[in-house]
């Protein structure tokens, strides 16, 4: 099924004081898949947040990173507007909203508080226990489950290693693999090498038997020029890599992890860099 990406993502400004871009850019990939990007002048992370619709439910994947104290991130306002607009277009009641996370790092859960008391909403708490229970992931992490939004099936795949509760989500309809911070055009930070390596294998096994059109992570940190990374903390990225990676990136990551084996180290590739966090578990 076809879909399109934004011709230009908001990517900050050389002078953020004069930035006039909205705090959240909203792009419709198709009628049921929305991609939101947080303005890098609000937070250098420049998070991508995803909203997926089915007939009965909508899934909000991540809630972004903290803006300056004087600024409000209008995530609930934007999500409410999209839900209301869809309900009007389909002549159906507003769908139930499920707020989930690729993982529990602070730059992915900031605006959870905006949804805690929202009617018709379930907010999955960050952490392995809550994720396992909600998505019925028995045998974590060597397992997977399905989650039905109502005619819109998602596969939930545990991918710890960057963070212990990390998951990837595969959308059967669009053939998009949402990979959070495990795989994107940027610095792939590893907290637990053994878990990360096993997750790379698990993701590749899944991709071997399921067609993947695009791999979408939660940030862009690489430049268009291969192997070139913007410094962490950059708030202006006019030459940034595109958001979407191809399915081959899944196999490149798996092969890179296998090539290093137990000798984990920084490993630079055209579209991503594997980086061991200080104090990372290596076995």
Image (cartoon, helix red, strand yellow):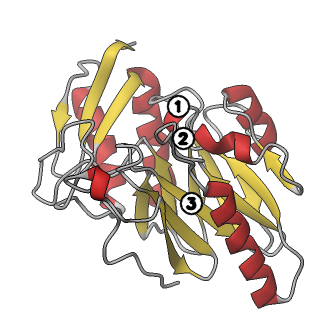
| Labelled disc at residue 254 | none
Quadrant occupied by the C terminus: top left
Task: Give the mark, 1 or 3, whose residue is nearer the N terminus.
Answer: 3
Label 2 crowd (10 A; few <14 / some 14-19 / many >=20): many
In the displayed structure, 122 sits above or below 81; it is above
Of the pair 266 and 113, the residue shown nearer to us = 113
Query: Residue 230, position in %: x, y?
Result: 18, 44
Asked if marks 1 and 3 touch (Cβ < 8 Å), the reply is: no
Asked if residue 255 lies left or right of residue 70, the reply is left
Task: Give the mark, 3 or 2, whose residue is nearer the N terminus.
Answer: 3
Residue tagged 2: 108
Asked if marks 1 and 2 touch (Cβ < 8 Å), the reply is: yes
When asked about the image quadrant of residue 113, the answer is top right
Residue tagged 3: 50
Residue tagged 1: 105
Asked if residue 34 lies left or right of residue 3, the reply is right
In the displayed structure, 244 sits above or below 105; it is below
Asked if residue 78 lies left or right of residue 99, the reply is left
In the displayed structure, 115 sits above or below 127; it is below
In the displayed structure, 141 sits above or below 179; it is above
Q: From mark 1 to mark 2, how far is it between C-alphas?
A: 6 Å
Q: From mark 3 to mark 2, how far is it between C-alphas?
A: 11 Å
Q: From mark 1 to mark 3, how far is it between C-alphas?
A: 16 Å
Q: Is residue 97 visible?
A: yes
Q: Residue at x 56, y 51 (%)?
A: 73
Query: Residue 28, position in %: x, y?
Result: 53, 77
Q: Residue at x 62, y 56 (%)?
A: 75
Q: Is residue 138 visible?
A: no
């Amino acid at each position: 099924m076809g879909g399109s990406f934004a011709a230009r993502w908001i990517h900050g400004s050389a002078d953020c004081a004069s930035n006039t871009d909205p705090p959240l850019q909203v792009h419709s990939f198709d009628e049921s898949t929305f991609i939101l990007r947080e303005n890098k002048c609000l937070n250098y992370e420049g998070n991508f947040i995803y909203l997926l619709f089915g007939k009965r439910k909508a899934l909000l994947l991540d809630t972004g990173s903290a803006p300056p104290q004087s600024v409000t991130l209008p995530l609930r306002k934007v999500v409410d507007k999209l839900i209301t607009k869809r309900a009007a277009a389909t002549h159906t009641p507003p769908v139930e909203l499920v707020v989930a996370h690729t993982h529990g790092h602070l730059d992915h859960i900031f605006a959870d508080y905006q949804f805690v008391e929202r009617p018709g909403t379930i907010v999955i708490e960050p952490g392995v226990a809550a994720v396992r229970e909600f998505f019925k992931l028995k045998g974590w992490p060597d397992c997977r489950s399905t989650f039905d939004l109502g005619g819109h099936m998602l596969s939930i795949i545990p991918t710890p290693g960057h963070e212990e509760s990390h998951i990837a989500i595969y959308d059967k309809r669009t053939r998009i693999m949402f990979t959070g911070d495990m795989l994107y055009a940027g610095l792939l930070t590893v907290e637990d090498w053994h878990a990360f390596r096993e997750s790379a294998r698990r993701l590749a096994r899944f991709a071997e038997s399921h067609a993947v059109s695009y791999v979408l992570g939660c940030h862009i940190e690489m430049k268009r020029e291969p192997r070139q990374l913007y410094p962490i903390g950059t708030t202006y990225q006019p030459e940034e890599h595109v958001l979407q990676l191809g399915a081959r990136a899944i196999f490149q990551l798996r092969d890179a992890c296998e090539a290093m084996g137990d000798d984990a180290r920084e490993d630079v590739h055209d579209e991503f860099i594997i980086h061991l966090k200080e104090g990372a578990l290596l076995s």
